[in-house]
Image (cartoon, rainbow, N blue to C red):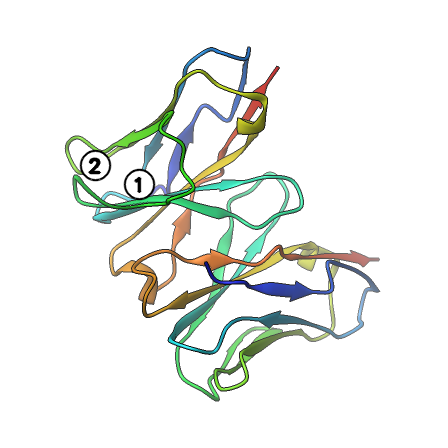
């Protein structure tokens, strides 16, 4: 068990560019979550996968955001046409029993949009 | 959207002091309450998940209580150590929210040696 892995750790991009982040969950976990955290705020839910199915998506999530988990293992989060307001820490978490039990988080990807 | 509040926002204590923080959440349709510790440059780490009114959980010097009827949870740290310095996050789940945990803004604890 190597924990939840996220890449890259840091990403600096110019406004208008597309970015993609990757999350590798704990191998036996079938549930995967994406959260976003901005300075001074708690993590905000973005989306949830059970195996390869995206079952929940925040209504606050712009159409510029898309997430996939094609084989029910790793997941990618893509942001198209980035804006300065997208600058945040993007956290991935996984679990085997859902949110009735604890989530295991990665270290996050810090995005800075210039 | 749930409103989960944590207080204080930040806290400075001396090594050896005991301290506590508060997490307030909507009591209606409550399902579960999570506590996490997030040290700088590391991953958030789960401390407790509580579901029943009156639950008390303990992990070393850290303990937590839960009151679902009035919508609050306390986190206690006994004899704070510098390695306890971190942001402590609580998150609430209600029955209507599916798998969407709602986090509070966190309490940032700094323990001075």
Query: On the image, numbered disc 1 is attached to which residue?
Result: A25
Residue A98 picture location, percent across and down? 28, 59
Residue for point 45% across, 23% down: A8
Crowd rating for badge 2 (residues with CA inside 10 Å; few <14, some 14–19, many 20+): some
SS under mark 2: loop
Same chain, marks 2 and 1? yes
Chain to which mark 1 belongs? A
Q: Report the number of numbered marks.
A: 2
Q: Nearer the viewer, residue B9 or B108?
A: B9
Q: Is B55 on the left-hand or right-hand side of A59? A: right
Residue B67 picture location, percent across and down? 52, 84
Residue for point 22% across, 33% down: A69
Q: Is A103 on the left-hand or right-hand side of A74? A: right
Crowd rating for badge 1 (residues with CA inside 10 Å; few <14, some 14–19, many 20+): many
Chain to which mark 2 belongs? A
SS under mark 1: loop
Query: On the image, numbered disc 2 is attached to which residue?
Result: A73
Q: Is A25 on the left-hand or right-hand side of B22? A: left
Residue A9 in the image: above or below residue B22: above
Q: Nearer the viewer, residue B112 or A33?
A: A33
Q: Are marks 2 and 1 in contact (CB under 8 Å)?
A: yes
């Amino acid at each position: 068990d190597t924990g939840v892995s996220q890449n890259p750790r840091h990403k600096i991009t110019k406004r208008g560019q597309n970015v993609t982040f990757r999350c590798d969950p704990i191998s036996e976990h079938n549930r995967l979550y994406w959260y976003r955290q901005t300075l001074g705020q708690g993590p905000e839910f973005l989306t949830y996968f059970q195996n390869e199915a995206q079952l929940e998506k925040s209504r606050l999530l712009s159409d510029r955001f898309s997430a996939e988990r094609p084989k029910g293992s790793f997941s990618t989060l893509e942001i198209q046409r980035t804006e300065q307001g997208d600058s945040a820490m993007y956290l991935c978490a996984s679990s085997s029993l859902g949110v009735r039990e604890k989530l295991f988080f990665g270290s996050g990807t810090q995005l800075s949009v210039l | 959207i749930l409103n989960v509040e944590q207080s204080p926002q930040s806290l400075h204590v001396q090594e050896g002091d005991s301290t506590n923080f508060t997490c307030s959440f909507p009591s209606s349709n409550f399902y579960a309450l999570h506590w996490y510790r997030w040290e700088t440059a590391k991953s958030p780490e789960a401390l407790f998940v509580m579901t029943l009114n009156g639950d008390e959980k303990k992990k070393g010097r850290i303990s937590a209580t839960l009151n679902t009827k009035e919508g609050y949870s306390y986190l206690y740290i006994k004899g704070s150590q510098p390695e306890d310095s971190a942001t402590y996050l609580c998150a609430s789940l209600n029955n209507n929210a599916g798998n969407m945990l709602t986090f509070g803004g966190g309490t940032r604890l700094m323990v001075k040696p």
